[in-house]
Image (spheres, rainbow, N blue to C red):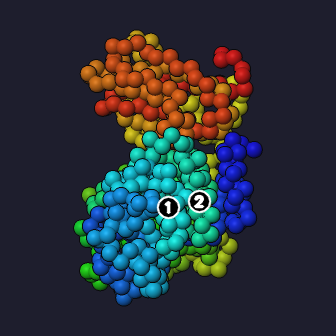
């Protein structure tokens, strides 16, 4: 048993009597049946930020019913940051803001339930929420039971200030999971950690969905950037081709809440919705439903696009083609067909062709347009979307329902991204499982030249530009981490760089090494630290546009001498 599984043991002991715990080929995963398909609902943040109150939320609940959103599958009505009073009550309990929610949070939940909807609330695992209202740190048990007593069905758990908690994220999330289980009330747990690697370090054992990106905003560039975290190499080594291998029924990559209805027009709204659909991202609407135009309603309730998102097989889509801003994604479905998205992000109009070969089919195949809900006919060997303008796309279903489900691609094998042998493993020879900032370059500095610190050249190592974070999976197999850290000689500016090595993710804040701020005049810093039992190693460099090197970065396993 690996140490990760060892860490989960207390949770399993508590949870196994209540929950069905399944072991899958991707590690330990919980399947309590609560989020077999990506959750769908509405969240207050993108529409209203902190400006929420009882009458607004009730009007939203009414609109979810009258607009047909509920019937289309949007059942969770989630209040984001801003619902709670500025301080806990005299007994230490959370209460709703008395001015905004005079009827109290239980009554609001009753209203929401009365509409045939489910009730969601936001909290944060830090001592404060992101907007500085009371956080749950130290009150986990109490808050989860308060939520249960109010009839909450869905908790969005944020991470602001959690780096001060002094607990590894995997330990912290297990606390929430078991506190929820002890309430006896089924509640979906949605983790917001802005893409700090939860897919990799195994948050799926505790939560049903986790964020893969920073906050989405009201523009198509932000929508594409969020999609790229889940469907491209925005936050992981390109060899993974997105995060699809980490998702499945009960555990979802969350590319953040929808901005459909808040973007410039239907072209942008539709491509956003199609991307979230093919990437099996949760569909949490974020527009003001009280004044939703029919054109936006039609997009958010498009039945065949939603059906792809909610496909029971739960296989997340992945990219099969990319050439600049021209992209094709594929998602094999449970009924033997496959969903295909052809997208042109570029200024210049483009034709895009998907070949059946790329999506596991051959011969003549039926093609259906999922937006138009129209059969386009049978096509031999390929299909071409002609003359797609900027941000235009086609979302198709290819094949005949009723056949055997088509295979997806093979996942990246564990030995490619985890320390698997004794002796020396250069980190550049492993695929990183999370990155933020510029991707590290293997065996060169960030500009592609030789790694060089204070005149010494290094044939191996990682060249970065600050700020950057990279996570590697050691799997508890390594004994020591060694590297030479310093500013690359190619950097001539005045800025500093701070090199830190952490156990697991950023919010755990378990610092194994800290260089302090280094200038280019300072000598290289030799790192040689104990990493026994460490599952995930996070390499962080902070600074402003500085070329920083983890020269000769390697781990030593099995007690052998470094060659
Ligand atoms: C952010 C989070 C947003 C929203 C906001 C509330 O950290 O990513 O989705 O919840 O906090 O303060």
Compared with 416, 9 (above or below) is below
Which residue ends up furthest to the front in the rendered image? 90
Residue drawn at x 39%, y 27% as measured from the top left: 498
The residue under the point 44% across, 41% down is 164
Q: Label 2 near label 1: C-beta < 8 Å?
A: yes
Question: Quick one: quadrant of the C terminus?
Answer: top right
Label 1 and label 2: CA atoms lie apart by 9 Å
Q: Which residue is mark 2?
A: 179
Q: Residue furthest left?
A: 264
Q: Which mark is residue 143?
A: 1
For residue 379, the mark is: none
Label 1 SS: helix
Locate residue 534, reporting x and y percent: 62, 35
Helix, strand or loop status at disc 2: helix
**Residue 485 visible from this viewpoint:** yes
Q: Position of residue 177 (x, y in %)?
A: 59, 58
The image shows residue 486 at horizontal and vertical percentages of 41, 20
């Amino acid at each position: 048993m690996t140490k990760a599984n060892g860490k989960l043991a207390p949770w399993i002991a508590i949870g196994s009597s209540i929950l069905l715990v399944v072991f899958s080929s991707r590690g330990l995963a919980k399947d309590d049946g609560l989020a077999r398909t990506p959750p769908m609902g509405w969240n207050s943040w993108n529409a209203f930020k902190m400006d929420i109150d009882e009458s607004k939320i009730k009007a939203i609940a009414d609109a979810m019913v009258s607009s047909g959103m509920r019937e289309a599958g949007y059942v969770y009505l989630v209040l984001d940051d801003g619902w709670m009073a500025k301080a806990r009550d005299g007994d230490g309990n959370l209460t709703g803001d008395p001015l905004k929610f005079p009827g109290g949070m239980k009554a609001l939940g009753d209203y929401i339930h009365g509409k045939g909807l489910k009730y969601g609330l936001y909290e944060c695992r830090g001592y404060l929420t992101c907007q500085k209202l009371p956080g749950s740190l130290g009150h986990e048990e109490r808050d989860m039971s308060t939520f249960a007593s109010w009839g909450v069905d869905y908790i969005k758990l944020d991470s602001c200030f959690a780096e001060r908690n002094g607990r590894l994220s995997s330990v912290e999330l297990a606390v929430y999971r078991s506190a929820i289980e002890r309430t006896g009330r089924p509640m979906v747990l949605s983790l917001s950690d802005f893409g700090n690697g939860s897919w990799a370090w195994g948050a799926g054992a505790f939560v049903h969905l986790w964020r893969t990106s920073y906050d989405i905003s009201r523009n198509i560039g932000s929508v594409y950037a969020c999609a790229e975290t889940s469907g491209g190499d925005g936050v992981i080594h390109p060899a993974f081709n997105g995060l699809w291998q980490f998702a499945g029924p009960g555990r979802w990559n969350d590319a953040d809440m929808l901005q459909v209805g808040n973007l410039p027009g239907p072209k942008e709204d539709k491509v956003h919705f199609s991307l979230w659909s093919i990437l099996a991202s949760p569909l949490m609407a974020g527009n003001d439903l009280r004044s939703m135009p029919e054109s936006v309603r039609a997009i958010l309730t498009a039945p065949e696009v939603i059906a792809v998102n909610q496909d029971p097989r739960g296989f997340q889509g992945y990219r099969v083609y990319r050439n600049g801003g021209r992209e094709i994604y594929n998602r094999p479905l449970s009924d033997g067909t496959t969903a295909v998205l052809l997208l042109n992000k570029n200024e210049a109009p483009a034709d895009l062709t998907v070949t059946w070969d790329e999506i596991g089919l051959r011969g003549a195949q039926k093609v259906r347009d999922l937006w138009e809900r129209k059969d386009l006919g049978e096509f031999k060997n390929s299909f071409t979307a002609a003359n797609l303008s900027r941000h235009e796309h086609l979302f198709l279903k290819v094949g005949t329902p009723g056949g055997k489900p088509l295979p997806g691609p093979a996942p990246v094998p564990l030995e490619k991204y985890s320390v698997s042998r004794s002796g020396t493993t250069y980190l550049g020879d492993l695929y990183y499982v999370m990155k933020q900032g510029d991707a590290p370059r293997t065996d060169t500095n960030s500009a592609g030249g030789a790694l060089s610190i204070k005149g010494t050249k290094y044939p191996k190592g990682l060249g970065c530009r600050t700020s950057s974070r990279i996570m590697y999976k050691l799997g508890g197999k390594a004994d020591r981490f060694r590297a030479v850290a310093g500013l690359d000689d190619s950097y001539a500016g005045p800025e500093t760089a701070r090199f830190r090595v952490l156990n697991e993710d950023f919010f755990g804040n378990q610092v194994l090494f800290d260089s302090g701020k280094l200038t280019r005049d300072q000598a290289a810093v030799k790192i040689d630290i104990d990493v026994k039992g460490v599952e995930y190693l996070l390499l962080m460099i902070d600074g402003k546009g500085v070329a920083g090197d983890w020269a000769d970065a390697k781990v030593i396993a099995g007690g052998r001498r470094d060659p």
